[in-house]
Amino acid sequence: MEAPVLTCDMIIVLSLVVTVLVLFIGEWIPLEGISLFTFAVLGFSGVLPEGKFLSGLSSSAPWMVAALFVVGAGFLHTGMVHALGFRILRWSGNSPRRFLLILMVIVLIVSAFINNTAVVAVFLPLTVLWARQLNVAPSRLLMPLSFCAILGGTCTLIGTSTNVVISAFSDVLNFEPLSMFEMSKMGIIYALTGLAYMFFISIYFMPDRQAPAELKSNLQMREKYLTEFQVTEETPFAGQSVDETPLTNSHGTYKIFNIVRDEEVITPPFENQTLEAGDMILMETPTDHINLLQEKYMLSLKVDHHLRDRDKGAEPVRLAETMIPPGSRLVGKTLAHLHFRLTHHVVVLAIQRRSKVLDHGFSSVRLKSGDILLLSGSDQAIERLGNTRHVTMLSNRLEEHQMRPKKAWIALMILVAFVLGASFSGLPIVAISFVAAGAMVGFGCLSLEQAYLSISWKIILFLGSAISMGEALEATKAADYLAHSIMAFLQPLGYTYIILGIYVLTSFISSLVTNNAAAAIMLPFAYGIGVKMGIDPRAIIMTVLFASSAAFATPIGYQTNLFIYGPGGYRFRDFLLVGIPLNILLGVVSVVMIPYFWPL
């Protein structure tokens, strides 16, 4: 077959794909910015018919993913996953190995039916807590948690949004949409292989950032924060020398960095220096001493002077730990730029980055995924911030109040009915997903506001732009052109090497950008190669499906990996050491088993 002639429209679309790939890797602009850029280029270039550049948003995939966000949130808000999580520790009998196995199995099963990113968000703070109780480093547990969530997501259509994206390309590439359990047989083999590797082999490569004997003391060090207090008229040691106060006579519990009085900054040593009402003290203090200093010594947190009265309510100002998740709009911005205090009515008391406490000006620090913030504010203000999805609460007592345990069995029945209906009713899955989402709200498993906040709208916008870009690749024959070029290289190697080449390339791209982006970029090219080579298109589709989720070698390829990167204290090389062998193992399994289930 003769190769298509390279046209101007092809060059525009291929340049757009490369640019989007670079923007994903560089992370210079947020995900929604990349999506809008994609729509703008497609619209202004005219490579698609008028008005068609927004067609991706009219596809069923983005809205099905939105409905699945609500279904998953309804299940999680009932507290069933939390209750299941706490049973794991009881079942493990305080054996770290048994605990790890039970954790991986449960996460793998739950992730097959609930968005795996949401599952990791729920299990992450619980796993850190269990690590402390079991006296093991969290780094020994968090990577298996993330990897098993990824593996579980490959077992069903709804386990990860990537599978939904691939199925949505059926309209663009003219193939039958994927069914609920079409990938399940292969997915179970794939997942169990990964689980066995994590339990029996990777344990020897898994980083141990903290020796068990030192864990407790290191965690105590980790819980010290740089905090600003103001001396009040009621402070018992106002008017006394600094050396006479409990702040310097507590066996090193506190460390004073400076004292600010009007415009004067007083630095150590504080010989014969007295404290006066109104002085601001910048010092390092353990988390659990902050309330003590307020109540016993009548020191006032700086937050008390900046929160509005309506945000304080009747309850006292309190503390919460939050983590910045991947894709948050806070990433790359400073607290000053975000007007964080005025917008959310909470104050950042400290920032931890990979177990380090940042002790310079918080307002000038550019936030990164995985950063942990110690916040101070009212219950209402912290709850509102937690509901924005810009942060993930790691320690927030309000979570128990938000649970609706009486609705747990209702949520479970809705989830089961949704899976059965999507599998056997013959009705469109997107319609059934909307019915399930409506039932979650209608039966009170979560509120309408919680349903709206559970949807990651930047993901919805991105999915729409990715599908539109895929349509442009097909409409301009750019996918055909590139497929023909790649085929000329792969054809002499045979069918097996074509599957291997597609798998390796897709997995490599997925390790650099998001799994959704890898699937959207690779599927049109890979599908074109398969058609030209006479390979069953289903085999190509499944190769891209499993390869795009094989993002184990870097922390940036999958959101769940970024989730655990900071709390686990991992380094980039940890993912290379543990993830590359897993990628190779799963690649071999895929190349052998995909032709078995979908003959070439």
Image (cartoon, rainbow, N blue to C red):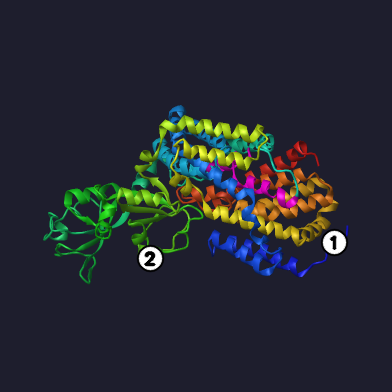
- Horizontal placement of 554 versus 90: left or right? right
Comparing 97 with 261, the one in front is 261
Three-letter code, disc 2: Ala
Comparing 414 with 254, the one in front is 414
Comparing 524 with 572, the one in front is 524
- Horizontal placement of 239 versus 109: left or right? left
Residue at which label 1 appears: 3
Q: Are marks 1 and 2 in contact (CB under 8 Å)?
A: no
Task: Check disc 2: other Cα within 10 Å, few if <14, some if 14-19, many if 20+.
Answer: some
For residue 93, above or below residue 342: above
Task: Check disc 1: other Cα within 10 Å, few if <14, some if 14-19, many if 20+.
Answer: few
Which secondary structure is most common in the magenta stretch? helix
Three-letter code, disc 1: Ala
Query: Residue 400's quadrant in the figure?
Result: top left
> Residue reaching furthest bottom?
263
Residue range highlighted in magenta:
144-173
Image location (x, y in percent) of residue 204: 55, 41
Residue at which label 2 appears: 336
Which of the marked residues, 1 or 2, is nearer the chain's N terminus?
Answer: 1
